[in-house]
């Protein structure tokens, strides 16, 4: 029978023999496991690159720690980058490379009781598939920053407050019930990427929207807009619009009242906010008066 910490022994042995540069690629990374990994890397290694992803829902579930950014303060060799679509697990030192299923977490590496069943296989660092994955990562990864880590943690804590013991089905239902509350959608991306700060009430609204949108850290503005628009299209009250029809503000207000149980005033405010988000993040525009949401851009 395999020893419980077999995966960790593989990683530790690889790190101990490292020279030159180390590359760690895993979607889920826990602070304690990364710290132990760094401790195993010889002082002669000059560069340690760590690529991961930070998704609020995953951080809330406890499978990943954005606080690994703090380790980069203590070990100046460490650089952390984010790749939102990352799923590969790869550990590279010199000519040696481990690939497989194991993340840098306690359960994956066997550093805790009741570990996962995982596999890591050694291949040559020159294997074409290793090169392909690293090239794709390099093309899309962006450097992590403390403000990203802090924002993801705040979103995760908000999610835990709203759904402390939610099942996957309940989480999905909660997200489907989301509609935006931030009145100024143009403020959301600047706040997300750390370019702007706002008053407490505005920040609270943006934080709520980001948390329930489930936006991973590290998206470009175009990727962010695509993500938001796709989530807006999932709002049940917008079904008629998504299916290609026009949608009046009155129809949307009535749908929100019926489906979300909003009062007249709440539905009116939500309708105005949703329309603003659709105009900003999607290809929709509104006519004046008793307006309609329509597909396309308004001609100037």
Image (spheres, rainbow, N blue to C red):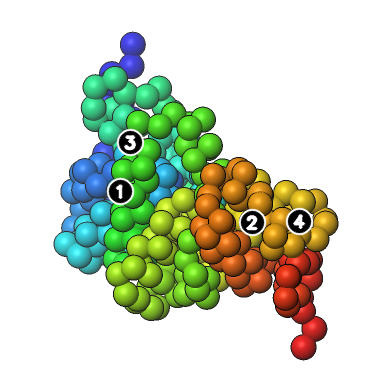
Circle nearer the N terminus (4, 3): 3
Of the image marks 3 and 2, the number of the one nearer the N terminus: 3
Of the two numbered discs 4 and 3 in the rendering, the one whose residue sits closer to the viewer: 4
Instruction: Decide: is 148 above or below 66.
Output: below
Which of the marked residues, 1 or 4, is nearer the chain's N terminus? 1
Residue 164 marker: 3
Q: CA gap, disc 3 to disc 2?
A: 30 Å
Q: Which of marks 2 and 1 is nearer the N terminus?
A: 1
In the drawing, what numbered circle is on residue 157? 1
Q: Earlier in the sequence, mark 3 or mark 1?
A: 1
Q: Gap in Å between the C-alphas at discs 2 and 1?
A: 31 Å
Q: Mark 2 points at which residue?
A: 253
In front: 222, or 51?
222
Does residue 168 show up?
Answer: yes
- Between circles 3 and 2, the one closer to the viewer is 2
In this view, the mark in front (1 or 4): 4
Give the percent coordinates (x, y) of residue 294.
78, 66
């Amino acid at each position: 029978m395999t020893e419980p910490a077999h995966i960790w022994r593989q990683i530790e042995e690889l790190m101990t023999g490292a020279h030159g540069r180390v590359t760690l690629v895993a979607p889920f990374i826990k602070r304690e496991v990364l710290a132990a990994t760094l401790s195993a890397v010889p002082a002669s290694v000059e560069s340690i690159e760590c690529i991961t992803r930070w998704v609020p829902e995953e951080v809330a579930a406890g499978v990943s720690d954005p606080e690994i950014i703090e380790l980069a303060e203590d070990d100046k060799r460490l650089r952390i980058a984010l790749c939102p679509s990352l799923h590969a697990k790869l550990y590279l030192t010199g000519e040696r490379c481990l690939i497989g299923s194991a993340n840098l977490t306690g359960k994956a590496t066997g550093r805790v009781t009741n570990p996962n069943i995982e596999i890591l296989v050694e291949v040559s660092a020159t294997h074409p598939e290793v090169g392909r994955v690293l090239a794709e990562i390099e093309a899309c990864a962006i450097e992590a920053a403390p403000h990203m880590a802090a924002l993801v943690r705040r979103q995760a804590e908000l999610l835990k407050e709203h759904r402390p013991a939610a099942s996957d089905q309940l989480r999905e239902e909660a997200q489907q019930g989301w509609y935006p509350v931030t009145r100024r959608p143009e403020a959301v991306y600047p706040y997300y990427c750390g370019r702007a700060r706002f008053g407490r009430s505005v920040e609270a609204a943006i934080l709520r929207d980001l948390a329930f949108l489930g936006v991973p850290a590290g998206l470009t503005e175009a990727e962010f807009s695509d993500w938001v628009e796709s989530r807006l299209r999932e709002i049940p009250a917008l079904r008629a619009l998504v299916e290609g029809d026009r949608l009046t503000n009155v129809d949307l207000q009535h749908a929100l009242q019926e489906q979300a149980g909003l009062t007249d005033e709440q539905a009116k405010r939500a309708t105005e906010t949703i329309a603003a988000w659709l105009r900003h993040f999607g290809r929709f525009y509104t006519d004046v008066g008793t307006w309609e949401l329509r597909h396309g851009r308004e001609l100037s």
